[in-house]
Image (spheres, rainbow, N blue to C red):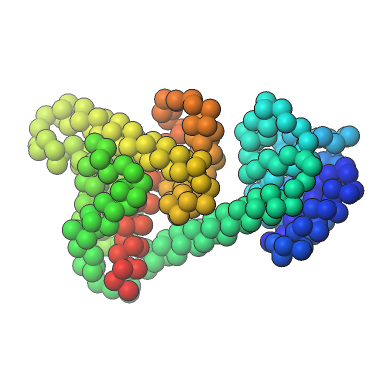
Amino acid sequence: MRYFIVDDDAAVRFMLAQIVEDADLGEVCGEAEDGSLVDHDFLSWKQVDILLIDMLMPKRDGIETIRQLNRYTGKIVMISQIESKELIAEAYSLGIEYYVTKPVNRLEVISVLQKVRERILLQQSIEGIQRTLHVLSAQTAFTRPVEHAYSERSILSSATFLLTELGVISEKGSKDLLAMMEILHRFEKDNGTEAKLPSLRDMFAAVAERKLGTGAAALIQKESKAAEQRVRRVIYQALTHLASLGLTDFGHPKFESYAALFFDFTEVRKRMRELENQVEMSIPPTRIHTKKFIYVLYMEAKRRLGVLQG
């Protein structure tokens, strides 16, 4: 893991570098005394995984620097003596992972950096799994017959387990999600795993038809929209459940396993802050990525079966 330290105090830079090296957390690949000396291209060239940055600096402070680094994909930890809740909240809203107050506490810094390091490794692992699943999904037609080993019942059992893990199996929308798992399984069985999966609109319509039969088009459309709302609600509940776990324990196994897999982690962080501030939000359209959640649930249910059977 590669670190870069930005702080106008040379003693603090030295202390942080010593902590990183003594705790064997990685290597410090560079330092700067002001935020104006770093930008996205520079950090990319340095291959920086974790940026440690002070808030108050003479030319460009930490908040403004983070704003300028909107394309930076690494993790940011802010270390400052400022304890203003408004400024700290602004730093978190800009995407920092942690805020550590000065004077620097060695054990706290080590604990925070270990958690950030583990998060990076976890995300890399999840991205690797997702890439592998995508490749395997595209190649399955060439490696085994279309009538694959997973039965409809086993897919449903695996998906039920995952919804239980996400804390939403008792929600009404879970039945709609399980119906979608059946629909996706049958679609792949009929068309092969190399076929493009059906659209959300088609799946919600199929769920409505399964429930109502071949009824009037207006009734099917109404039930389709109702199913979509139930599914969005249950996905939001899953987001809330994972956020509450992360708020209690950032290292909780379920939080680490599922948060970044089913959701964009920026949305998980937002929900954590809402829960922390006891703010109850409605479900705006941009907050719930329904398609991603449904397809990840299906692929993860199949992957889990492969692990169990292997």
In the image, farthest residue toward the left: 214
Instruction: Note whether residue 74 is visible.
Output: no
296, 105: nearer the viewer: 105
Residue 13 is situated, as x and y percent measured from the top left of the image, at 84, 50
Q: How far from the left and from the top, in percent, is residue 239?
A: 42, 40
What number of labels is visible?
0
**Image quarter of residue 35:** top right
Q: Looking at the image, is 148 positioned above or below residue 99? A: below
Q: Which residue lies at the image location 18% right of the left edge and 58% below the top edge? A: 153
Residue at (65, 43) in percent of width and height: 98
Q: Position of residue 34 (x, y in %)?
A: 86, 42
**Which is nearer the eye, 161 or 72?**
161
Query: Where does the N terminus fall, quadrant-wise?
Result: bottom right
Q: Does residue 172 lie above or below 2 as drawn? A: above
Residue 56 visible in image = yes
User: In the picture provided, is 50 more to the left or to the right than 224?
Assistant: right
Q: Residue at x 9, y 38 (%)?
A: 213
Q: Quadrant of the C terminus?
A: bottom left
Q: Position of residue 242 (x, y in %)?
A: 43, 43
Viewer-nearest residue: 106 or 291: 106
Left or right, 134 with respect to 19, comes to left
Q: Quadrant of residue 3?
A: bottom right
* Residue 51 as seen in the image, left or right of residue 93: right
Q: Residue at x 42, y 25 (%)?
A: 282
